[in-house]
Image: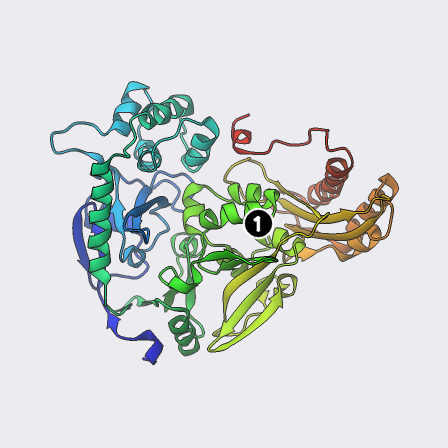
């Protein structure tokens, strides 16, 4: 193995609750849900959809936060692969039980508010509430809705569950004993994988590598150019659970430390390819508030805690939510193969459906998002059948600057769901730049839009609907920029339940 990868380790080390586990001979594609139910017989974690949608499989993962404590997040066990547990703590509903049988405050709150009906979804809800409890509790209705948006109750019992969240939040753990417990867990996890080599699994079902540096990642991809790159698994997991694919080898980037950062320069935001939506959310919201709101509506809390901005770009989906917004902002990506890097405008990365400007062995290393210059207004609109946790039918993103004379001096428009790739609307842009920002120019831009897109019909929307919506979103942009006092949409956490 090339020098950047160092020594190798063949056992998966993690904590299941407070108990250490060291697993060998594990199929790299075994999901955490399968492992819990079949190997550990912890059957409180349920399978509902097997695609990260219903939340019945919700578990909590803990990792050292770098400051001597622990950071906890909810994830979907049904699409998380077992090797990704390496160096982490896995908590299930069974771990909330105390030795004397006393219910955990979250469980007691669910009992007190009658938050469980048929009970199938209850363990998943409990774990989402438990993560809120670990973070200090929450009383804000919108924040609670955000935390629970990835947990579906077919008995429509959300009201009592929300009350349970508030009740449990009033007794959330934040004392010194809890902080000491977390410090002890962090120290144990760090010691379990300290000074050890890269996790490398050889199994009859396939191989799995978890490099720790981007140099090692680059070397592995040169050696295995056809490998499946795994980040959060929010898409790749479905290849296994729904398409029954066999992936060999898998190269996991979640342990690559130097692509996990978000930092700002004077002119841009730099997002490492391994940064999750949750970690990128606030920084993207500072660049443009509509990008922050857009990210908040990607999947659920569980999905945002695992999925990455880099992965959303690299998989090339025509309905990925972040690419249109980033294209409208003029974003670039850094591609790397071995020691060679190149910058590509994001709009040029997508060639046609299923094909990107990425060579075998090359990977997305980072995303460069320019900060809007003075006077540039950015708007993004996601259209889907549900407000939360739904696949986009049409996504529109616009960056526009109108001078004091009312003329459009800058305009970039990008759409998702309207073509085989996320795509700029260059004819639409040309119809507006240099023109007065009025209804006549708006109509011309809408006509231009109709001439450059031929959307498809599918289960989410017909082609006619998509075109009409795209044109109407231009109208929405016009209203919001010319008559900002007119209310046109729901924005912010409270929008999830208004």
Q: Is residue 30 left or right of residue 318?
A: left
Quadrant position of residue 138: top left
- The residue lying toward the viewer, choosing from 287 and 332, is 287
Nearest the viewer among 157 and 475 is 475
Residue at 16% in and 33% down? 98
Instruction: Find residue 153 and report its horizontal and vertical position in percent.
Output: 40, 30
Q: Quadrant of residue 239?
A: bottom left
Report the front residue among 177 and 135. Answer: 177
Q: Does residue 338 appear in the picture of this structure? A: yes
Query: Is 204 placed left or right of 247 in the picture?
Result: left
- Residue 26, position as x, y percentages in the image: 24, 61
* Residue at the far left in the pictured view: 100
Q: Badge 1, how many Cα within 10 Å: few under 14, some, many 20+?
A: many
Which residue shows up at 64% across the image and 56% down it? Answer: 327
Q: What residue is pinned by disc 1?
A: 321
Seen in the picture, residue 67 relative to 336 is either above or below; the reply is: above
- Report the colour scheme: rainbow
- Does the image show residue 42? no
Percent across and percent down for residue 265 are 56, 58
Secondary structure found at label 1: loop
Q: Is residue 387 above or below residue 317?
A: above
Q: Give the quadrant of residue 49.
A: top left
Q: Position of residue 457 (x, y in %)?
A: 65, 47
């Amino acid at each position: 193995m090339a020098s950047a990868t160092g020594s190798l380790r063949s056992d998966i080390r993690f904590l299941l609750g407070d108990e250490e586990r060291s697993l060998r001979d594990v199929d790299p594609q075994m999901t955490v849900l399968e492992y819990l139910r079949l190997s550990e017989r912890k059957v409180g974690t349920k399978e509902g959809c097997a695609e990260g949608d219903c939340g019945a499989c919700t578990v909590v993962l803990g990792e050292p936060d770098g400051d001597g404590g622990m950071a906890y997040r909810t994830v979907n066990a049904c699409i998380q692969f077992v090797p990704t547990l390496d160096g982490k703590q896995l908590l299930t509903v069974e771990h909330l039980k105390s030795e004397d049988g006393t219910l955990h405050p979250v469980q007691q709150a669910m009992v007190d508010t009658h938050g469980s009906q048929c009970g199938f979804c209850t363990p998943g809800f409990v774990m989402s509430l438990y993560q809120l409890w670990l973070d200090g509790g929450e009383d804000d209705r919108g924040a609670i809705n955000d935390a629970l948006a990835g947990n579906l109750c077919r008995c429509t019992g959300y009201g009592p569950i929300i009350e349970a969240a508030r009740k449990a939040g009033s007794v959330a753990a934040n004392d010194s004993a809890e902080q000491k417990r977390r410090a002890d867990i962090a120290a144990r996890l760090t010691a379990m994988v300290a000074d050890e080599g890269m996790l490398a699994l050889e199994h009859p079902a396939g191989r799995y590598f978890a490099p720790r540096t981007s140099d090692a990642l680059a070397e592995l991809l040169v050696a295995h150019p056809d490998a499946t790159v795994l980040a959060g698994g929010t898409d790749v997991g479905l290849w296994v659970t729904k398409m029954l694919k066999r992936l060999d080898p898998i190269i996991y980037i979640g342990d690559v430390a130097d692509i996990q950062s978000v930092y700002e320069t004077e002119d841009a935001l730099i997002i490492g390819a391994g940064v999750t939506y949750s970690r990128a959310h606030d920084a993207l919201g500072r660049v443009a508030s509509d990008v922050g709101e857009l990210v908040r509506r990607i999947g659920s809390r569980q999905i945002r805690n695992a999925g990455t901005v880099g992965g959303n770009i690299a998989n090339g989906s025509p309905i990925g939510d972040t690419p249109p917004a980033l294209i409208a902002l003029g974003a670039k990506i850094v591609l790397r193969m071995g020691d060679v890097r190149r910058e590509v405008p994001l709009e040029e990365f997508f060639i046609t459906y299923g094909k990107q400007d990425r060579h075998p062995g090359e990977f997305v290393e980072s995303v460069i998002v320019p900060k809007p210059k003075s006077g540039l207004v950015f708007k993004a609109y996601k259209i889907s059948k549900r407000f939360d946790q739904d696949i986009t039918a049409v996504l529109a993103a616009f960056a526009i600057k109108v001078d004091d004379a009312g003329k459009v001096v800058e305009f970039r428009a990008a759409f998702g769901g309207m073509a085989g790739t996320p795509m700029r609307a260059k004819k639409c842009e040309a119809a507006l730049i240099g023109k007065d920002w009025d209804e006549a120019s708006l109509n011309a831009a809408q006509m231009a839009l109709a001439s450059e897109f031929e959307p498809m019909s599918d289960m989410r929307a017909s082609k006619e609907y998509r075109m009409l919506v795209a044109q109407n979103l231009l109208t929405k942009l016009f209203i919001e920029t010319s008559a900002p006092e007119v209310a046109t949409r729901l924005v912010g956490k409270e929008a999830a339940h208004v």
